[in-house]
Image: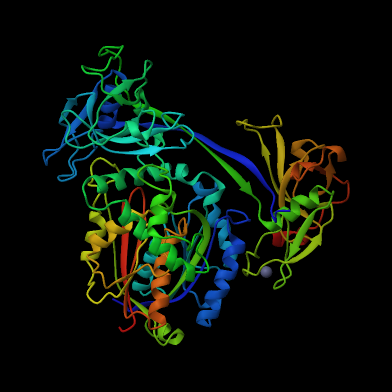
Amino acid sequence: MRDVAVVGFAQRQMQDFDGSPTCVELLVPLFAECYEQTGWSRRDIGFWCSGSSDYLAGRSFSFVQAVDAIGVIPPVNESHVEMDLAWAMYEAWLKIQTGEVDTALVYAFGKSSAGVLRRTLALQLDPYTMTPLWPDTVSLAGLQARAGIDAGLWDETAMAEVAHRSLTDAEKNEYAVRKGGSSVSALLSRPLYADPLRKHDCAPVTDGAAAIVLAAGDRAREVRDRPAWLTGISHHVDPMSMGTRDLTRSPSTARSGAALDLTGVDTAELHAPFSHQELVLRRELGLGDDVRVNPSGGALTSNPMFSAGGIRVGEAARRVWAGESDKALAHATSGPALQQNLVCTLEGQR
Amino acid sequence: MSRTLSAPVTVAFDYTRSTGPVLGRFLTGLRDGVLVAARTSDGEVVVPPPEYDPVTHAATTDFVEVSPTGTVTSWTWVPEPVAAQPLERPFAFALVLLDGATQPFLHALDVASPADATTGMRVQVRWRPERVGAITDIECFEPAAGGAPPVDRPHSTLDPVTGVVTPVALDYTYAASPEESAFYRGLAEGRIVGQRCPACAKVYVPPRSACPADGTPTTDEVELAHTGTVTTFCIVNVPFLGQRITPPYVSAYVLLDGADIAFLHLILDIPAEEVRMGMRVEAVWKPREEWGTTIENISHFRPTGEPDAAYDTYSQHL
Ligand SMILES: [Zn+2]
């Protein structure tokens, strides 16, 4: 296996992006930031991979148009996944492992505000027995939240504590859509929305884009004194149907975590778009109370579709670069109620 | 003023799918007022039946009927239903463990308020009077009345269900990029606006947010001539849904004078078979009072009557 590290990261998260769904104009400055961080130009990038979905904004082949932000003369080595940035990063990591390239820039974008996000995502479901009912994302998460409450695994206070900590940490995150102004008691006094969820238990609809730069071995050491080495990466998937899995658990997260060495993890960026999902993930990954969870504020405070999972990787990497973390865990999710999960570890020492 | 122009757009498509032997059996059951589950190798009774066994991965073959009455194992309130959900007023989604099954089933639950829903409540299927073999043949669940829920059609002898049609319609607010917005605003003033790449000097129309050749943001606005050259074209002979002109007609790439990229428009006022590469054309605008922020302000292009452009003048833009 080749040593591969995260050496660049740039992001934008916003409530409403006043621009087209191809997000080209958002991506241009993100790439510029990545070039500045690495000292490279676009010609130093061996492989490009993007994550997005045309259903999000109702524009076909938006990922093809987004390539404008790269520039394709001379031609580039490029791919796309209909998944979150974290999975695009996985494809790029594999590409580097093949030895074909040494560097990669992966990016993702999405304009969630163009349609009704919670409805659009019903297209991810089984087209025979689920999509025709249009079960929206919030409802599916609500079923999961209640299952845990009824089982005595968490309660509304524990969920509010997650929201409060996230909102407080997000005060230091310039990109967070929601931040601050909460206490657990104030949150609990707010009305229920999708009973048992309150609005602060659900991530805000967020537009945005993000980019991550990967490099192998010495190419990574050229860029940073302390690259964030990807020492483990694993992803699994649970059944799509809501009935055939125990919604209070996330076996695919547990299995992904078990495939990695999580000893010594001091920081975890968990992609939990709903407050109770952080509680599920912590349990499945066996994270102790001494692990700092979501210092960025996490996806509960802004959740740009197709970027938010990769942003967890970027946020974890930033802390490793800065020496604030020796070993960080990043997690990304996709699909209904934590169906698909990717876990990776990033370390300052190789 | 917002930086960009936007407009509502609906993207709709009716997905037609074959159902296969397992889902077909389940959907046939729904049409006939029966709930079909599968018994899997680990002893579970699952509805809807999975197509393959989760443990052995063998095709599902062991089917059983389960009761249309069951118990809620989880539920959530839907305060603001979205389009095409089972009920248009606030309702609950619920996981219902049907009597005879071991795994719960997702569907809507019709109760007046969240106070009327509880985990553990007994519920029953409310069948739709006209059923077609779709998951929506169950209108929703409702609190159980005791006894079997009424179903107004007994087991039928119709053919099994082999296909379903799922209509999908999504509403968006579609936004143009700031550069495209400038283009459309220019059209509303009778101007054709492009942008020049500051790195390679290529002129794009409609303007793009970045030069596709080198990735540089295209910032310098340029106004383009209303005349140009046909680079390539096709004669449309095939009728299709939403077509506005009777075939045959010509759809062509027109390279406006001063631009480095051609754009697509109609060539009219000439028989289709006479349109050719290199033909010089000019924009024909609709009457000014009909203009909006749209490319339709230009009705079409027509021949100028000038001699054809030499191939060299457009060979790099094909
Ligand atoms: Zn250029």
- Indicate how the structure is coloured in the image: rainbow
Task: Residue at 63% x, 41% y: name it.
Answer: B8
Q: Quadrant of residue B195?
A: bottom right
Residue B244 drawn above or below residue B206: above
Q: Is residue A34 visible?
A: yes
Q: Position of residue B17 (x, y in %)?
A: 39, 32
The residue depicted at 70 percent of the width and 46 percent of the height is B233
Residue A319 is situated, as x and y percent measured from the top left of the image, at 40, 77
Location of residue A213 (image quadrant): bottom left
What is the number of callouts on the image?
Answer: 0
Q: Say if B216 sits above or below B53 in the image.
A: below
Q: Is residue A88 visible?
A: no
Which residue is at 31% across, 11% downward?
B152
Q: Position of residue A215 (x, y in %)?
A: 41, 77
Instruction: Indicate the quadrant of ligand 1 in the picture.
Output: bottom right
Q: Residue B6 or B187: which is nearer the viewer?
A: B6
Compared across the picture, whether A103 is left or right of B66 comes to right
> x, y percentage for residue B171?
56, 39
Question: Which quadrant is home to the N terminus of chain A?
Answer: bottom left
Taking the spot 26% from the left edge, 59% from the top edge, the residue there is A253
Is A147 or B240 nearer to us in this picture? A147
- The answer to whether A42 is drawn above or below residue B20 in the figure is below
From the viewer's perspective, is residue A192 above or below residue A338? above
Position of the C terminus of chain A by quadrant = bottom left
Horizontal arrangement in the rendering, residue B163 relative to residue A74 (left or right): left
